[in-house]
Image: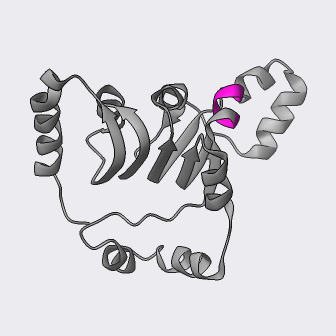
């Protein structure tokens, strides 16, 4: 992938109008993002309060992030998005730091998973998901995980899933 300054890309777009169709696959980039399929949760996650803004400001500093997290992941997010706005537009989402997913249905997770990219290091899951979806979200760079979701899996797969989680936790390194 080649990156160029925006002014050059715009000029190139004037010379070669076909370039626009390729620019549409460019991912939107976020440090921290909250994605949901629940309208009420979206409204809540989109609401900015004074305290939340203060936590977001403080959360930028690694030491304070570590203190706020303690043994758990207490995430902050820059933006709240809906599964529909991502999936309908086939908009790729690049996440640098924290990915929070709150999907009421496993099918919503399935709609958005192929569109999530990036080296995110913190993962928070809520709602209803499957073991396979969690496996796909856990890459070697994920350092902190919080799963507050109902996980659909066949009882014969419990041991396998426990091994996956144990290997991931075993590889945990303090921030």
Looking at the rendering, which quadrant does residue 92 occupy? Answer: top right
Report whether 111 appears left or right of 21. left
Q: Position of residue 21 (x, y in %)?
A: 76, 21
Residue appearing at x 52%, y 78% in the figure? 55
As drawn, 32 above or below 142 = below
Looking at the rendering, which quadrant does residue 134 occupy? Answer: top left
As drawn, 154 above or below 146 = above
Report whether 175 appears left or right of 42. left
Examine the structure image and report whether residue 156 is included in the region drawn in magenta.
no
Q: Position of residue 79 (x, y in %)?
A: 63, 56
Report whether 137 appears left or right of 54. left
Q: Position of residue 109 (x, y in %)?
A: 48, 32
Q: Main secondary structure of the magenta part?
A: helix
Task: Pick whichever, 139 or 149, lies toward us.
Answer: 149
Residue appearing at x 57%, y 82% in the figure? 54
As drawn, 68 above or below 84 = below
Looking at the rendering, which quadrant does residue 112 occupy? Answer: top right
Residue appearing at x 76%, y 45% in the figure? 6
Q: Position of residue 154 (x, y in %)?
A: 22, 22
Q: Residue furthest right?
A: 14
Specify start and end residues of the magenta stretch as a single range: 85-89
Q: Quadrant of the C terminus?
A: bottom left
As drawn, 135 above or below 121 = above
């Amino acid at each position: 992938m080649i990156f160029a300054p925006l002014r050059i890309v715009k000029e190139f777009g004037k010379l070669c109008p076909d370039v626009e169709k390729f620019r549409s696959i460019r991912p939107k980039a976020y440090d921290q993002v909250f994605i949901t399929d629940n309208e009420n949760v979206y409204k809540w996650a989109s609401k900015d309060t004074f305290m939340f803004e203060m936590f977001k400001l403080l959360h930028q500093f690694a030491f304070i992030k570590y203190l706020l997290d303690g043994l758990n992941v207490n995430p902050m997010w820059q933006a709240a998005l809906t599964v529909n706005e991502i999936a309908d537009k086939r908009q790729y989402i690049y996440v640098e730091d924290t990915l929070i997913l709150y999907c009421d249905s496993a099918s919503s997770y399935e709609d958005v998973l192929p569109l999530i990219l990036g080296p995110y290091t913190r993962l928070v899951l809520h709602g209803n998901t499957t073991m396979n979806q969690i496996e796909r979200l856990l890459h070697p760079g994920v350092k902190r995980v919080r799963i507050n979701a109902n996980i659909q899996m066949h009882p014969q797969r419990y041991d396998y899933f426990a091994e996956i989680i144990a290997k991931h936790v075993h590889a945990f390194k303090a921030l």
